[in-house]
Image (cartoon, rainbow, N blue to C red):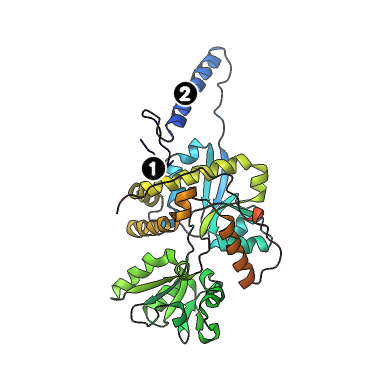
Amino acid sequence: MESGVGGRREPEGTPKPGEVRMRTMVTSTRATVALGLWAAALGAAPVAAAAKDPLTLALNFVPYGIHVPFYVAQQKGFYEQANLDVTIQRGTGSADAVAKVGAGAADVGFADAGAVVVGRAKGAKVTMVAMTMDRGLGTIYTYKGSGITKPKDLEGRTVADNAGGGAGILLPALAAIHGIDVKKINIVIVAAPAKNPTLIEKKVDAIFTFSTIEPNLKALAAAKGMEIVGLYFSDWGLDLYGMGLFASEKALGERRDAVRRWTEATMRAVAWSVENPEEAVTLFVRQNMAVSPDLARAHWEIVVDHLLTPAAKEQGIGYMTEEKMRRTRDILVKYQKLDGDIPLNMLYTNEFLPRLLPKRPAR
């Protein structure tokens, strides 16, 4: 029988993923109990179970569907099996997550690769350990009938973005590819929560944002009888790395084995969630009851779209290539005018990745 997660052909009777570890845990538990009874009989104190290693995880935002695997890892026992006690902190953006981990307020994090590059240039000593969204997230959203069908059509139009928006920052790079005169685009800055309504109310012709907001945007549009159109940067020649896992240099130096176990356990939860999306979303919503199950499922499907790229199907999910990481770094450095050298070997590592090849269920 071939495992959809591991991608290797195993002989009949081979335990399923996690079964060997579970048997070991059961055997170990029985041995500990027996030893404790024996010690008690001799008047000695029972042997205590080993304490789990604590890790603090900083998310990029309040939990929504893109964060499904972290809660799956908690509830399905992936972290417990790795002997980890993981505390999840919500955030206010990728830059916030990078800042927390860089300052030591958290051990590991989840953020956009661009924010990691920028943070590293500004002194945050953090390193990416897995890429969960191999495909870039930057997107131009407009509405059907706006006349915008390609990036060049933005000239002479009004486009909304929030201050420091990750997609809008990449506009000069996109403009260089397509010969766009950025000075001919009227960019208005709005608060992040107002960006979607601004487009739905047709106060602007388009917005710069990330593809992960698409379900929310389409839900608002449907209520107005509108049809939303997305122009994905990755389809128009600007495919940079998206969201991924990262850790502080301090944790990598002082708690390297714990980071290794966290990375492996999280990526196994990602693979399990790809193959079991309905149950994964149910587990997530159980811990985040304010989130709509339908939206959470739609967000998770977007993650899987960005995860299962040709590179991931060949090398395994989470794998990062030197070429694409170099491109991501160089474009951010150039167009954000970042100072300082950022060596690639300090920006990312594939060292901790298990080779996982999950198969998406038929839809």
**Callout 2, which amino acid?**
Thr
Tell whether 123 sits left or right of 91. right
The answer to the question of whether label 1 and label 2 lie on touching residues, with beta carbons closer than 8 A, is no
Can residue 121 be seen? yes
Residue found at x 47% / y 23%: 27
Front of the two marks 1 and 2: 1
* Above/below status of 150 relative to 290: below
Residue found at x 51% / y 60%: 242
Dot 2 surroundings within 10 Å: few (below 14), some, or many (20 or more)?
few
Query: Can you say which quadrant of the picture contains the C terminus?
Result: bottom left
**Residue 317: mark in rendering:** none
Q: Who is closer to the viewer here, 319 or 43?
A: 319
Q: CA distance from mark 1 to mark 2?
A: 28 Å
Residue at the top extreme?
Answer: 42
* Above/below status of 131 relative to 49: below
Tell whether 15 sits left or right of 177. left
Residue at the right extreme?
Answer: 340
Element class at badge 2: helix
**Residue 27: mark in rendering:** 2
Q: Position of residue 324 (x, y in %)?
A: 56, 60
Q: Mark 1 or mark 2, which has the lower sequence index? A: 1
Q: Position of residue 97 (x, y in %)?
A: 57, 58
Element class at badge 1: loop
Q: Position of residue 252 (x, y in %)?
A: 64, 46
**Callout 1, which amino acid?**
Gly
Q: Who is closer to the viewer here, 1 or 210?
A: 1
**Residue 4: mark in rendering:** 1
